[in-house]
Image: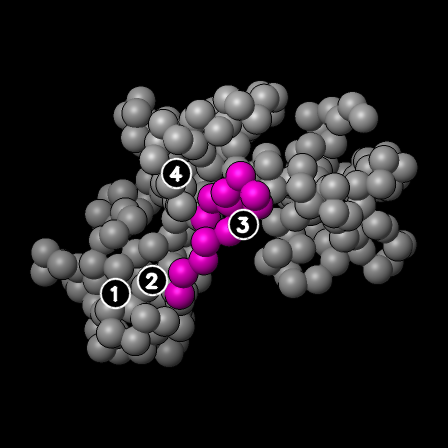
Amino acid sequence: MTITQAEENHLKAIFKIVEKEEGPALTNAIATAMQTTAASVTDMLKRLADKNLITYEKYKGVQLTGEGTRIATFLIRNHRLWEVFLTEKLGFAWDEVHDIAEQLEHVQGNNLVSRLDAFLGHPKFDPHGDPIPDAEGRWTYRKQSLLAALRPGDRGVVTGVGDHSAAFLQYLDQFGLSLDAELELLEQFPYDHSVRIRTSDGRELVLSEKVTRNLYIKLEDTGR
């Protein structure tokens, strides 16, 4: 069965939406993720259903079949391994690698990916803190919380981001909030849900609610 890059990209988008929403992916959500129209997505869903890669019920959403899940998982594994390679071996910044990895993820060949994985030392997480599935499709998850869910006095380290856009990552770089950065939540402001934090070097920063809902933290003491 031949699968186009466009079909692969839709499978990956569906996988991520289902994972985030913990339920079927709706057409409008897929259209937003793919930056296209609902009508275009509907046409694509018919093609994917004909290939038994998804199950689709009108008004009820989309789920991946076993084969659809396998393909999507393989693409995500490829993408995140290439991101590790680009940052660790070629010196790209974490805000530069997504678009390049989007192209490299479609390169075929299990042997290439296996060698890349071994060369990198079998990493469990990519440069944005997202888990990398292994060759069997198994994922490694860790306990982490959104900064928005922390309480004053909580301390922890940055483990991931919910927003992968270059603009957001560059914004974090301005404040030194990369992965493994240590911070303490000092205060929450009820008016706009912003927070005041202290970094490990003693700087105090005020972060907006948008930032706190896109920054994952592993707590120092409780392990949340």
Q: Are marks 2 and 4 in contact (CB under 8 Å)?
A: no
Instruction: Identify the amino acid type marked 2.
Output: Ile
In the picture, measured across the screen, residue 208 lies left or right of residue 81, that is left
Q: Which mark is residue 156?
A: 1
Query: Image height check: is 6 above or below 192?
Result: above
Q: Closer to the camera: disc 2 or disc 3?
A: 3
For label 4, the residue is 122
Question: Mark 3 or mark 4, which has the lower sequence index?
Answer: 4
Q: Residue at x 69, y 45 (%)?
A: 69
Q: Secondary structure at mark 4?
A: loop
Question: Closest to the observer: 1 or 215?
Answer: 1
- Where residue 93 appears, as percent x and y from the top left, is 32, 32
Measure the C-alpha gap from mark 2 to mark 3: 23 Å
Q: Closer to the camera: disc 4 or disc 1?
A: 4
User: In the image, which residues are magenta?
Assistant: 131-143
Q: Is residue 191 visible?
A: yes
Dominant secondary-structure state across the stretch colored magenta: loop
Q: Secondary structure at mark 2?
A: strand
- Where residue 76 appears, as percent x and y from the top left, is 55, 39
For label 3, the residue is 138
Query: Image height check: is 156 above or below 3?
Result: below
Residue 141 magenta: yes
Question: Mark 2 or mark 4, which has the lower sequence index?
Answer: 4
